[in-house]
Amino acid sequence: MGMARIGDVDLHYDIFGESGPAVLLVMGLGSRGDNWTPISRALAGRGYRAIQFDNRDVGRSSRFPGGSYDIADMAGDAVGLLDHLGIAEARLVGISMGGMIAQELAVRFPERLSRLMLIATWPGGDLARKPEGAVLSELAALARGGDRAASEARLGAFYRAITGPSFVEKNRELLDMAVAFALEGAPEEEGLMRQIQAISRFSIGDRLGDVRARTLVLHGDADPLIPFENGELIARRIPGAKLRALRGVGHLVPLEAPLETYGALLDFLS
């Protein structure tokens, strides 16, 4: 593990694997980089160097009280981390908000990535298919504050709202474990709102034609938070991109479909 100073941001990161092609894994809203750890370890076992990190306002990375930033700033953080590690080119994987960061990076810094995998994400702006109001209400509730019990209840309700239709009934204990894990080192309410606001301002649909990296879009066709139509739109807009649908899977793709996610990732990277 390490800390990288990038402008006015300290980014906490971990690396799995001592050599091999670099894979930069970018996590989503309010989530720490160590959510990638099972996949990072597996990639290291296959000869890759997997790099995961905490986005700003999350985990052990810098907080920005009273400030604001955009997805473009977070893409700059990711490129700065590659610079810090002396990596000229990487394979890039982003999920949800991390997929937005990855799209921005692919457009602004095309020379820094050779392949791009986008999981459960959207292009933002007027082109994006928005979630239903009930799901947005559950998302907004996450930033209300309160004690651990209240935060746990709200996060549990949010996870239940954004997973596939049969996941909760079959995996209640797994969902409870995911909630407990997410609450450790979770962002403060203001930090979560700064990330939500950055997402709300994000719009890249008219620039996706500039992406040059080989691209795979992986999306659950039962995603309530970022509807599947967004994955279809991204795949149409990026030249040569491939779309892989996960049947019956919601937004928490690696949790709901771990074997399919790792299999698609490994096939694509290799």
Image (cartoon, helix red, strand yellow):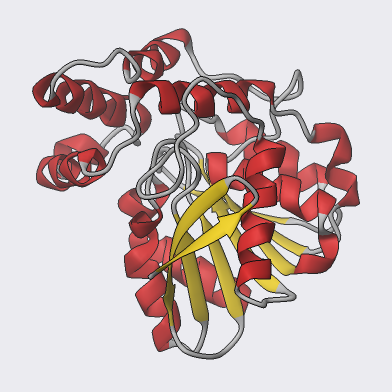
Q: Quadrant of residue 89?
A: bottom right
Residue, x 30% and y 12% (percent of image)?
144
52 in relation to 67, above or below:
below
Q: Quadrant of residue 85?
A: bottom right
* Residue 90 visible, this angle: yes
Residue 73 image offset from top left, x and y in percent:
68, 40
Horizontal side of residue 101 vs 54, given as left or right: right
210 in relation to 121, above or below:
below
* Residue 120 visible, this angle: no
Residue, x 57% and y 66% (percent of image)?
24
Horizontal side of residue 131 vs 253, given as left or right: right
Residue, x 32% and y 68% (percent of image)?
38
Which part of the image, by quadrant, shows the N terminus?
A: bottom left
Q: Quadrant of residue 80?
A: bottom right
Task: Give the total number of marks visible in the rendering.
Answer: 0
Horizontal side of residue 90 vs 208, given as left or right: left
Residue 248 image offset from top left, x and y in percent:
40, 41
Which part of the image, by quadrant, shows the C terminus?
A: bottom right
Residue, x 49% and y 74% (percent of image)?
50
Residue 54 image offset from top left, x and y in percent:
44, 51
Decide which of 231, 85 is in the foreground and name it: 85
27 in relation to 233, above or below:
below
